[in-house]
Amino acid sequence: SGDSKDPPKAQSAEAPSADKPPSGDLKATPSLSVRAVLKKREYGPKYTQNNFITAVRAMNEFCLKPSDLVQLRKIRRRSPHDDTEAFTVFLRSDVEPLSTLVCSASNLTFSFFWSTDIFRNQQLLKEYKDFWGNTKVNYFSFYLNVMNASRVNGLNFFFKLLAWVYTGSASMFSEAIHSLADTCNQALLAVGISQSVRNPDAVHPYGFSNMRYIASLISGVGIFMMGAGLSWYHGIMGLLHPEPMESLLWAYCILAGSLVSEGATLLVASNEIKKSARLQGLSFYEYVMQSRDPSTNVVLLEDAAAVLGVIMAAGCMGLTSLTGNPLYDSLGSLGVGTLLGAVSAFLIYTNTEALLAPSIQAEHVQKLTEFLENDPAVRAIHDVKATDMGLSKVRFKAEVDFDGRVVTRSYLEKQDIDQILNDIQQVKTPEELENFMLKHGENIIDTLGAEVDRLEKELKQRNPEVRHVDLEIL
């Protein structure tokens, strides 16, 4: 009936059998291959009801009690924590209807707010309990060192103040203010140390360790305002209005005692820093510059400035005694103020840098990177970030490109290959293929999660300072 450009019709489902060939020319009949395509599924809000929910969330958000959870279906899942076994979860599609039956709207609202602090805090503390490790190991050592230094400086302030009242020396006044500033700042630092070892809570899940840096920063500002400012003021006033001084014998005796006491606390702080630097493989200078231990650093710098200030004040007072010119004494006050200003600027700079969570040393980052790259399951890593969260506690983050073949092989090594082969041979329909792929696909994803847990655990074991690891899967 003429030339037709219509496409050829699909072959009928009732195809002729092989032993009874169709009539007509075989070459004129095209052979069509039919590919089964699974129907695309729409994942709407109802699909999320099949999400897994822990017992904590079920009690926290859905007003359920442990006795209510007994009647629900229980599913054992891999734990997200590397130090715990598999745990039990529930289906959200089971929890929500049960919650509607058990709780009224008002009861649910009341229970939600009442249980937030109980259950949510427990879960958060579980997640972050190992982040800081044992933060109280060196607590008493640091605290006692700071308090002893504060007591010594308090006594020095009292005697220096008496010497200033007796002699009227501007340098002695600066030294008295210097000791007062050290006393107040070290008392503030002791408060910061006591606050820094508080346990993490829901509002501060990473703890309060940075309180040491905050206290040290305030201490640096206090030194500048109280110590340097008053010393400069008194020195300038001494230059503008010089006054004769009384005998300086008692002042020299008090300065000698102050030199001995502050030199002893300086020696203790130096030994603490040397010991800590040796444990971390750093030099004395690197440890101080990186502000690894702000409490010891403050004591070290303040006592070093105190020793230098005593020597400077004694020298200027000696020149005044020899020449009878009070201007040398005023210059000593300005020198002590300048010394305090330099210490203050250093403390403000180092503690500000520490509060900004700087990156750790490049060599250490390279070491962590090489460890991950040498693992057979890792193809590549990107966007590596390793930050110092305070007190040498490191948080490590990286985007990891896993080798899917290695992960799949790791899964297959734990399976019965013959059984999997038999299951494949039994697949005849698209629905059976879908069920087969869903089953093993979920198991492979669990294997990938187990690989992430393994890497995080080994990374922490090899590098104890790494307390929190975030590995993002590409």
Image: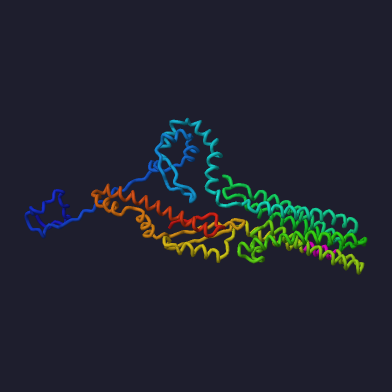
- Residue span colored magenta: 330-338
User: Residue at image x 14%, y 56%?
Assistant: 4
Query: Would residue 334 appear left or right of 355 to someone viewing this image?
Result: right
Residue 391, x across and y down, in percent: 62, 56
Using the image, determine if residue 467 lies above or below residue 286: above
In-image side of 93 versus 422 (left or right): right
Residue 338 position, x and y percent, is 77, 63
Residue 240: say if magenta: no
Query: Residue 61, can we see it?
Result: yes
Would residue 344 be seen by someone viewing this image from the given angle? no
Task: Give the farthest residue toward the left.
Answer: 23
Nearer the observer, 208 or 413 = 413
Q: Does the magenta stretch mainly form a helix, a strand or a loop?
A: helix
Q: Which quarter of the rendering shows the C terminus?
A: bottom left
The one of 291 and 74 positioned closer to us in this rendering? 74
Q: Is residue 84 above or below residue 117?
A: below
